[in-house]
Amino acid sequence: MFDNTGTFLHRLILPSRLHTAESRTPARPYGLCVIGNTGTLAVCDRDAHRIVLMAYDGSVVGDLLTSTDGLRYPFDVDVSVADDGRKLVAVIESYSGLLGNEPHHAVKLFAV
């Protein structure tokens, strides 16, 4: 992370690891975005089928979207905050169809 003058502040490392039901941090992080001036990041946890909200220090705030919302293999994300406070979320989903599964590619839009 850098400040607005370009001075290095600290780094956030999210190690790639196998997903477990107990894990809060993303197991296989892919795309991410900064959510306006909220101090949070939206991080794609591809294999867990969710978008995780994280603070700049790496702590998990919660899930923004999950498989119960219809999310599958999120690969990239963009979030904007509407005037009424709702988050408008654009997600690219991508799965190549390994191990005999059908390939899946989609763009989905959510208002949460």
Image: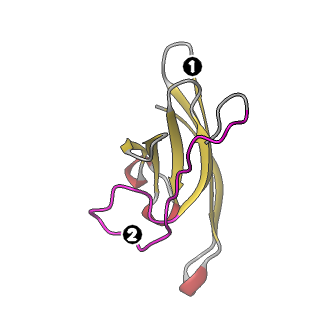
Q: 112 or 21: which is nearer to us?
A: 21
Residue under the image location 58 percent in, 40 percent down: 9
The amino acid pointed to by label 2 is His
Q: 79 or 39: which is nearer to us?
A: 39
Task: Give the numbered dot on residue 82.
Answer: 1
Task: Give the numbered dot on residue 19.
Answer: 2
- Residue 102 is left or right of residue 15, and the answer is right
Q: Is residue 1 above or below residue 86?
A: below
**Can residue 90 be spotted in the picture?**
no
Q: Residues within 10 Å of mark 2 (few under 14, many from 20)?
A: some
User: Which callout, 2 or 1, points to the residue nearer the camera?
Assistant: 2
Q: Which residues are magenta?
A: 6-28
Q: Secondary structure at mark 2?
A: loop
Residue under the image location 48 percent in, 18 percent down: 85
Q: Position of residue 74 (x, y in %)?
A: 56, 56
Q: Is 26 colored magenta in this rendering?
A: yes
**Can residue 43 be spotted in the picture?**
yes
Q: 40 or 6: which is nearer to us?
A: 6
Q: Position of residue 41 (x, y in %)?
A: 53, 40
- Residue 58 is left or right of residue 23, and the answer is right
